Image (tube, rainbow, N blue to C red):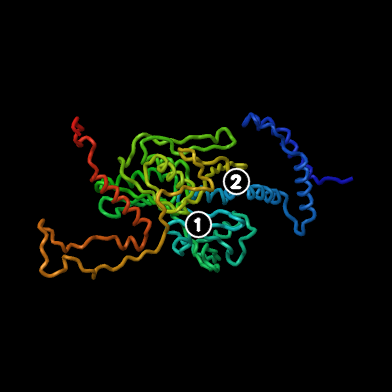
Amino acid sequence: MHTLSPSLLMLRCGLLALTLALPFSASAADPESEDRLPLDELRTFADVFNQIRIGYVEQIDDSQLLEYAIQGMLMNLDPHSAYLDKDDFEDLQNTTSGEFSGLGLEVGMEDGYVKIIAPIDGSPAAEAGLMSGDVILNLDGKAVKGMSLNEAIDLMRGPKGSEIELTIGRPGESQPFDVTLQRDTIKVASVRERFLEPGYGYIRVAQFQNQTGPDVKAALQRLMEEEELKGLVLDLRNNPGGVLRASVDVAGLFMDSGLVVYTEGRLPNSHIRYSAEPGDASAGTPIVVLINGGSASASEIVAGALQDHNRAVIMGSDSFGKGSVQTVMPISESRAVKLTTALYFTPEGRSIQAAGIVPDILVERARVTAYDTSRQLSEADLNRRLENVNGDSGDKPRKVSSELLASDNQLYEALTLLKGVNILGKRQRPAAILPAPTDDS
C-alpha cells in the first residue's frame, strides 16, 4: 500500500478543503459561478508534486516547489500576470512613486523572450538607444528563452554603477547586437514642458505616476501664464503607462466632462466607469497627441479618450495595445499576485487590447534632411528690383524649424498641423456676419 508523505497529505487535505469551500465563496462573488475545483486534476497535481520532491536530482524545499507551481500558473496566463515576492512588490511601489534602481526599461514577455515596451526618458537604456520593440535575447551571456519575466528582471537588477551586457534582437536588423549598460538610480521626471515656438506649447509625459495629473495641470498653467497658448503638443511616445487614476486625471484636464474609460471583467467590482470632472483646463486649446509603439496602457487611455471626444488629433504610429487591467492581490505579508482582471474600453466602446490606438494621422519616425535653400535666388535678390509698395523689405528670411525637422520629424509635423489649424481659425468668417438672403437672391 502506497503511503503519502506528511507534506503531500497536508497538500491534498488543503486542496480538498479549498474544493469544499469554493462554491460558497465563488457564489458570493459571482452568483452564476457554481463550479467546484476539479478533484481529479488536483490529485494529479499532488501526485506530480510528490514525484518531484522525492525523485528530482536535487532536493527542493516544499515551499519553494509550491512557489514554482504558482509562478508557472501565472506565467502561462498572459504577459502581465505575475507572482510578486517581497522585492518585486517593493519595486512595483517604487516605480509608481517615481524613483527606483535599474536600467530604465518597461518590459513584457512575448514568445518566451523579454520584449522592450519602452525605455524610460533619461535612463541608461534610453541613452544607449534601446527602442520599443527590441527583444532581449541574452543577459550577461545567459539565454533569456525559458526564463520567467521575474527571473529576467532579477538579472537586470544590481548595485548602482555595476554593468550588464544585453544581447538585443531588433526588427529589421539581420543580426543581434550587444550593448553594455551601467545600472543607475532611475528618477523619472514624469512631466516636462516648454514652448516649441511662440504660442505653441509642448508637454511631455514620460510615465503615469501618482502625481502626474497635478503635475500636468501645473505645467499647463505655467505655459498659459507665460503667453497666449495657440496650440499644444501632448507627447505620450514611449510612455509605458502606470497609474490608471493618473491617466483619467490627465485626460480630464482637456475635456469638459464626459466618460474617459471603462473596464469590464468577470468580477462584479471590475465593471467601473471613469469620467472627467467638468471644466477644460486648457480652455479649448487645439491639441495634437503624439503616440508610437511604446505608448501603452494609461497612455492609450488618454489618447483614446481625447480621440473619441474629438478633442485632439492623434498623430504618430499605432500604440502598443495593452488594454488589460492588473490587480495586485496580497496573499501574505510579503507576497502578492498581480492578476489580469479586466479590459479597458474607450468611451466609444473600443477595446484597446492587442489593437492599440490607431492615429488619425500616420507619421512614422524618420530621419529627414532639409535642402539648403540659402543660395536660391528670389526676386528680392535681383538688381534694380521694384520695391514692395507696402514697405516690406523683401529680404527678411523665413524662419523654418529645420533643426526640429531633423531631430524629431513627428514633433515637427505636430507643430505644423497646429499652425495650420490656427491659420484656418483666423480665416474663417463667423456665420453671423454673412449677408442675409433676400427674395431676389
Horizontally, residue 79 falls left or right of residue 405, namely right
Q: Which residue is mark 1?
A: 105
Taking depth in this image into account, of 229 and 246 the one nearest to the observer is 229
Amino acid, disc 2: Ser
Question: Mark 1 Cα within 10 Å, few/some/many (few <14, many 20+)?
Answer: many
Labels 1 & 2 near each other (Cβ < 8 A): no
Q: Position of residue 50 (x, y in %)?
A: 78, 49
Q: Position of residue 252 (x, y in %)?
A: 39, 39
Residue under the point 66% across and 47% down: 73
Residue 278 position by quadrant: top left
Check the image and name the residue furthest to the right: 1
Horizontally, residue 64 falls left or right of residue 132, namely right
Earlier residue among tags 1 and 2: 1
**Circle 1 SS class:** strand
Whole-Å distance between the Cαs marked 1 and 2? 24 Å
Amino acid, disc 1: Leu
Q: Which residue is mark 2?
A: 334
Taking depth in this image into account, of 376 and 257 the one nearest to the observer is 376
Residue 39 versus residue 71 in the image, above or below: above
Residue under the point 45% across and 60% down: 126
